[in-house]
Image: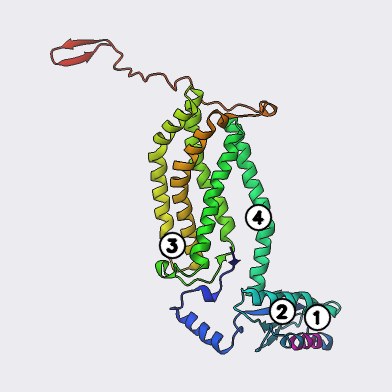
Amino acid sequence: MHTRLLSYTDLPESLPVIKAYNDIQRAFPGAQTPAEVVIRAPNVRAPQVVAAGEELVTRALATPYFKLPVRASASADGTVARIDIPLVGNGTDASSDRALALLRGTLIPQTLGKVPGLTPAVTGITAGTKDFNDQMKSRAPIIFAFVLGLAFCLLLLTFRSIVIPIKAILLNLISVFASYGALVLIFQHHWAEGILGFRSNGAIVSWLPMFLFVVLFALSMDYHIFILSRVKELVDGGMKTEEAVERAVKGTAGTVTSAAVVMVAVFAVFATLRTLDIKQMGVGLAIAVFLDATVVRAVLLPAGMKLLGDWNWYLPRSLRWLPSLQHDLAGLHRPAVDEQAALPVEAAGDAVVAVD
């Protein structure tokens, strides 16, 4: 999966502003997505700072990764300046990334970086995408570990089994990763453009993978606990695991299916919008919920529990000190009693009268 932040190029080309943007881009390639070198110094108009900026531009244009037109501006108080240097590529491809790495790692340290008291930084679409992706990737393991660890602990306490939480996490991750794969297949490639009415930029919007993970994991766990709670009630009541799974899946199928239909329909509406990131979100959520309610909950969950049998409720001896959260089983299998029907009655012709 390749991720990137959206830009003007990801908006519908039928918009007048995008037509003008494309005309400028064709006349001056890279001018609309330059690397923006921001300089902070006591006096950006000082000869030493100006000379370093000119040297930076000269060295950059001497490489095949940068091109004209270069633009420079300064704040009114003379403490901040900006130099816009167009990059090769479209701003988010490998060529632009190499240009950014050269600018940050070599050109700036050898020029502006040698001026005392000067603080340089690089921003722009290319830098923003790279920095955001780096931030997301560095934090992703923490988010994954927190969500999965918390889910494991809650399921362990609820069902007093080490197998149930492991299996639940694996099944929920199937839904999430299947959604990721569908997004890559649909939006990073071009074959579905005509079907969904979009133009592929070869990437997924940067914030979407983490967003989908937390949302889909919550939705998937909701279905999972709903079904497992019924299975647990039946097993605690003395029913065999295989029979309990069959009855629980049959008993909850209507509710799970109805909820899934509603959510898929709502998420599918987002897929009809023209904004690419919202379209990706709608498609990803709709596909994940559909797969979760059909393949995962209707096939993989009952099949896995039937194969494992009594091993579903395995709890190591070292963990049996954990508190037990038991359901109220007192009336689970007690026949329902109609208080009115239990009253003594007398026949009075064709009428039946209850006698208090």
Q: Residue at x 50, y 84 (%)?
A: 20
Quadrant that contains the C terminus: top left
Residue sitting nearer the eye, 302 or 115: 302
Q: Position of residue 143 (x, y in %)?
A: 65, 51
Q: Work out whether mark 4 precedes mark 2 in sequence or the reverse, and give the earlier one.
A: 2
Determine the CA span between mark 4 and mark 2: 29 Å
User: Can you say whether 294 is above or below 163 in the image?
Assistant: below
CB under 8 Å between discs 3 and 4: no
Instruction: Indicate the position of residue 9 as horizontal and vertical percent values.
Output: 53, 76
Query: How far apart, in angstroms, are the residues tagged by discs 3 and 4?
Result: 26 Å
- Which numbered tag is attached to residue 271? 3
- Which residue is denoted by mark 1 in the rendering? 112
Q: How crowded is the residue under tag 4: few (<14 C-alpha within 10 Å), some, or many (20+)?
A: some
Q: Which residues are magenta?
A: 50-58
Of circles 3 and 2, which is in front?
3
Residue 42 visible in the shown view: no
* Furthest-left residue in this view: 349
Q: Which quadrant holds the N terminus? A: bottom right
State the residue in front, 115 or 80.
115
Identify the amino acid type marked 3. Answer: Ala
Amino acid type of disc 2? Val
Contact between marks 1 and 2 (CB within 8 A): the answer is: yes
Which residue is found at the position 54% from the left and 46% from the top? 172
Task: Give residue 37's mark.
Answer: 2
Residue type at tag 1: Leu
User: Residue 127, located in which quarter of the rendered image?
Assistant: bottom right
Q: Residue at point 29% right, 12% down?
A: 343
Q: Earlier in the sequence, mark 3 or mark 4?
A: 4
Residue 140: mark in rendering: 4
Dot 1 or dot 2, earlier in sequence: 2
Q: Earlier in the sequence, mark 4 or mark 1?
A: 1
User: Where is residue 318 drawn, in percent x and y?
Assistant: 70, 28
